[in-house]
Amino acid sequence: MAKILIKGGRVISPAQQLDDTCDILIENGKISAIGKKLDSKGAEVIDAADKVVTPGLVDIHVHLRDPGFEYKEDIASGTLAAVTGGFTSVACMPNTNPVNDNQAVTSFILKKAAEDGHCRIFPIASITKGLEGESLTEMGELKELGVYAVSDDGKPVSNPQLMRRAMEYARPFGMTIISHAEDLDLVGSGVMNDGPVATELGLKGIPWVAEDAATAREVMLAEFTGAHLHVAHVSTKGSIDIVRQAKKRGVAVTCEAAPHHFTLTDDAVRGYNTNAKMNPPLRSEEDREAVRQGIADGTVDAIATDHAPHHIDEKNVEFAIAMNGIVGLETALPLTLKLVEEGLIDLPKAIALLTNGPADVLDLPVGQLEEGGDADVTVIDPDFEWTVETQKLVSKSKNTPFGDWQMKGAAVCTIVAGKIAYKRG
Amino acid sequence: MSFKHKHILGIEQLAKEDIQLILDTGDAFKEINSRDIKKVPTLRGKTIINAFFEASTRTRLSFEIAGKRLSADTVNISGSTSSVVKGETLEDTARNIEAMAPDIIVIRHAHSGSSHYLAERVGCSIVNAGDGAHEHPSQALLDLMTIREHKGSIEGLEVAIVGDIAHSRVVRSNIYALSKMGARVRLCGPGTMLPIGIERLGNVEVFTDMHDAIKDVDVVMMLRIQMERQSNIMLPSLREYARFYGLNPINVQLAKPDAIVMHPGPMNRGVEISSVVADGVQNVILDQVENGVAVRMALLYLVSGVESMQT
């Protein structure tokens, strides 16, 4: 296997508290050396001067739509979008068809990932069979297959007794419960954030209390059971507060924030923009600010995209009937670096939120740079300026609210297990 | 002044001058409706499609009569007969309609933003005849025309609107329209029917007590309680609704003695309005319907871009 030398970059690996200008030598899929002036003999040299070299980025919340919805995305296209965005590991949600609620579907995904994938895939299985909220999946065997977490993402578990049992059952297997925290009765037939913009547009609102009430319930159940709870895509001030307080009490809770929630508000829905429709919805400025504060003070453990590809026909309809979700893998890195530019966090913190932060949430064996470890490395040009051209996105689906946005920062080279999976330009 | 709006998607996009021009044009057209021969050749050769994807009697009839009195060819399609039930998207339906070269599509649709959606996708003029809970501009314009007829001017008036504020497109259009014309709007309804931030849409004050809301107002506008849409977690009973939010011969006296009583119809007698008030001397409800034809003639005429009025 090829030998690669990444030369002269600013190497940041928060897991090792490493932030220094040095070289990284990759041999046989592993990092063989990290140090100054390493010998380049026989190696393909990647000049990383003025670049930032980080562990391969990790996204613990994506929808690859495979199996079942390959017209939206598949394992090949989704992972190609991932490496284009600098990600070397993605954890994919189970709301496929069939649902990933058993070992056969998990095995299928892992097999296809090995054959067609451009990066590592960590399948997330469902909490309940068929996402139906009635009976538990076989978490023990799923864990043996390499499933690190379970989630009924997109179809929250409404029965609190069932969630309690899921947590009690998952805990001894070291399985994380990822909650899409929404009280569906409070969501009702809402299609966007409840507030002045929904009132103006005459669209039914999803109130913040639908998320806060569910987050509070999940946190209490986690406190009661001792299970590890991960709250997906936190979007409200109240949820951030609930997680912050729970962490202070020592509850085993983590949470993630999505780039769209710390970048946009429900203002983006104006004009009935279906590419600003997702679940949880874009919230108020106060909520957006609270999510950013949660990122700054460490309440938020990870940035995760909730990459949710949908076909144009599913978005090119009236707002109320458009599908929820946006693609995010190719825009997450610059939107995160924007937080550095705006002074909210420093660069190592931003990298942590995209590497060891998410890896630690699910206890994934990735997200760091270590001699002898797997060579998943991302080379980032933090100053690279580019425009989001919707039609040129690598993902099969083009549902982004960031079309025509000026971005700063991009992955220039993404290395997965010692192989160059993506090189810009 | 000339009218520069190709579409009528809502009152929100209209300036005060636009509204005045529409009302003045409506006043001029109104006379035609009392003639022996109620037809002028103004829109001869124009084709207007009334695409009503949601049930409507009054508004559809009003638009159709308005088009016919201007000599346009009007064609109606309705939700039950359209290809919508066959699973066609709104865009495809619209493109197919457009391929038959209409000049104006009047659209009524259950989804907020649907007229906006069409305007972005077809080349002809779009007139919104009610989109979800968003806007119902022709209703607000006929309301303004009626108020102006009875009060002379709209500037400085106090207008109370009572009922299901949350689900009403009539309210949103009226808030924009009345605020732009200098009136003050008081909104009142049950706590379950007052949406967040409604006061930001215009010159609005929100009340929860109907007596406070209608005290000394110039206009009382009652909204229809959509009985077919009410689940019993929005309202305990229509009986209690009538008691706290219904207009009756007693509480109507809190308004100014010369106040007018309006209702966009269809009325639920004995619920939001008692028959005594609905048929009382202050009611202008049928004037609203009459003016509806005139104001819709004005809208069709103005968006069709005909330079001179031939009457």
Image: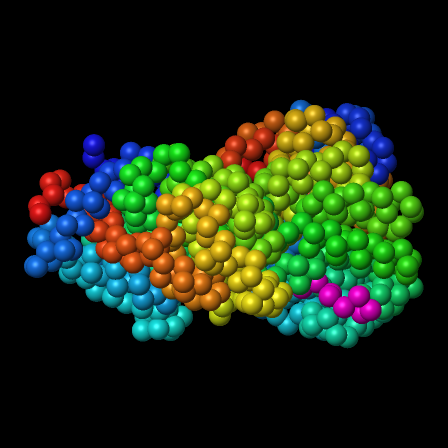
Q: Choose top left, top right, bottom left or bottom right for residue B24.
A: top left
Q: Nearer the viewer, residue A320 or A167?
A: A320
Q: Is residue A84 visible?
A: no
Residue A317: x and y, percent?
A: 44, 57
Q: Position of residue A153 (x, y in %)?
A: 69, 60
Colouring: rainbow
Which SS does the magenta portion mostly show?
A: loop
Q: Position of residue A175 (x, y in %)?
A: 84, 61
Quadrant of the image for the C terminus of chain A? top right
**Image side of residue A159 versus residue A115, left or right:** right
* Magenta residue span: A155-162
Q: Is residue B279 in the magenta section?
A: no
Total marks placed:
0
Residue A253 vs A174, above or below: the answer is above
In this rendering, does residue B272 appear at all?
yes
Give yes or no for residue A159 being in the magenta stretch.
yes
Please tell me which residue is depicted at 49% across the width and 56% down the height of the picture. B250
